[in-house]
Image (cartoon, rainbow, N blue to C red):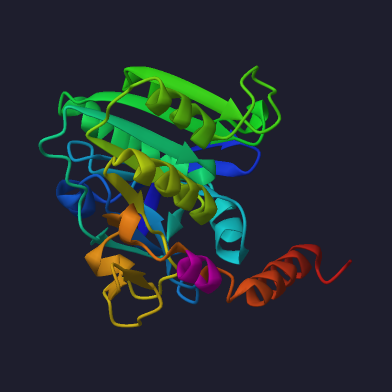
């Protein structure tokens, strides 16, 4: 069992949890992930490591309450525990040789963008951060991001923070104005990462994306997280999750991400029925 030592709601649909996991914390690096089960009968779900403290022996994840498992996880109180956590899994991010970078985050991808931006900051890389939310009320980690960025730009789809537009619009303004980056790191929904890659390709800027595909075992055995990268088959869990965004077949990845929508809907509906005792 892994005890929840801290729990905080970042907004109405997003939760930060810190678990006591000393062995994982000791080995964790930015970009890696864990696979978690809420209880003995629960499904195995991957979560990117949003933070780790080897001294305290803790690992932090940030998740959005969306499906059956994340709803169950959100109900576990601070001081409670989950059945098991396996990790760290995946390859750590490699940022060697960079002097100037941009980190682009959208939606829940911002929870992953933060440890990437922090890692770059700790390496002394001058880092611009651009993040986007649907509305101002959904914004998370802005203070933390500002502390590790050279310049933070926050966009909202509805303009409720006074900065309306997509993250690609803010990035394009910087590139068109002559900003030069050794690399752009894009993390978020697949359409957003594809749009960033389409933009940076025209400027010849190396672009790294984090592919958080559907996974089961997290060790390359199940094959669920397979991707096509540069015409070759790759597995996000063992070959990634970081990949050269200009080589990723995003159309295929987006089609695969939609394969289990009906099952996800049925699972979420069953969860609601359990909570209400079958009442509708």
In the rendered image of this protein, does residue 201 appear above or below residue 261? Answer: above
The picture places residue 144, in percent across and down from the top left corner, at: 40, 24
Specify start and end residues of the magenta stretch as a single range: 251-256
User: Is-magenta flag for residue 252?
Assistant: yes
Whether residue 141 is visible to the viewer of this picture, yes or no, is no
Quarter of the figure with residue 96: top left
- Residue at (26%, 44%) from the top-left corner? 206
Q: Is residue 172 left or right of residue 205?
A: right
Q: Is residue 123 left or right of residue 152?
A: left
Whether residue 201 is visible to the viewer of this picture, yes or no, is yes
Q: Is residue 196 left or right of residue 24?
A: right
Q: Quadrant of the N terminus?
A: bottom left
Is the magenta region chiefly helix, strand or loop? helix
The picture places residue 51, in percent across and down from the top left corner, at: 31, 40
Q: Total label count? A: 0
Report the front residue among 212 and 207. 207
User: Is-magenta flag for residue 70?
Assistant: no
Q: Quadrant of the C terminus?
A: bottom right
Report the front residue among 179 and 237. 179
In the rendered image of this protein, does residue 148 appear above or below residue 237? Answer: above
- Residue at (88%, 68%) from the top-left corner? 279
Quarter of the figure with residue 238: bottom left
- Residue at (59%, 35%) from the top-left corner? 133
């Amino acid at each position: 069992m892994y005890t929840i030592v801290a729990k905080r709601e970042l907004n109405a649909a997003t939760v930060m949890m810190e678990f006591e996991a000393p062995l994982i914390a000791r080995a964790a690096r930015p970009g890696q992930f864990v696979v978690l089960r809420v209880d003995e009968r629960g499904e195995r779900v991957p979560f990117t490591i949003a933070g780790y403290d080897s001294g305290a022996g803790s690992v932090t994840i940030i998740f959005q309450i969306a499906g059956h498992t994340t709803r169950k996880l959100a109900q576990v109180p601070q001081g409670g525990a989950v059945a098991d956590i396996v990790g760290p899994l995946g390859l750590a991010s490699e940022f060697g040789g960079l002097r100037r970078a941009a980190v682009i985050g959208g939606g829940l991808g911002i929870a992953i963008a933060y440890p990437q931006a922090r890692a770059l900051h700790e390496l002394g890389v001058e880092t611009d951060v651009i993040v986007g939310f649907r509305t101002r009320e959904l914004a998370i980690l802005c203070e933390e991001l500002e502390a590790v960025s050279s310049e933070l730009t926050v966009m909202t789809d509805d303009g409720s923070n006074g900065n309306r537009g997509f993250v690609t619009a803010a990035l394009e303004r910087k590139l068109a104005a002559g900003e030069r980056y050794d690399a752009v790191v894009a993390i978020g929904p697949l359409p957003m990462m594809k749009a960033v890659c389409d933009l940076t390709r025209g400027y010849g800027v190396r672009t790294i994306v984090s592919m958080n595909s559907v996974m089961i075992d997290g060790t390359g055995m199940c094959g669920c997280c397979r991707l096509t990268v540069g015409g070759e088959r790759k597995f996000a869990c063992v070959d990634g999750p970081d990949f050269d965004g200009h080589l990723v077949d995003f159309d295929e990845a987006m089609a695969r991400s939609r394969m289990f929508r009906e099952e996800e809907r049925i699972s979420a509906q069953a969860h609601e029925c359990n909570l209400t005792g079958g009442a509708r």
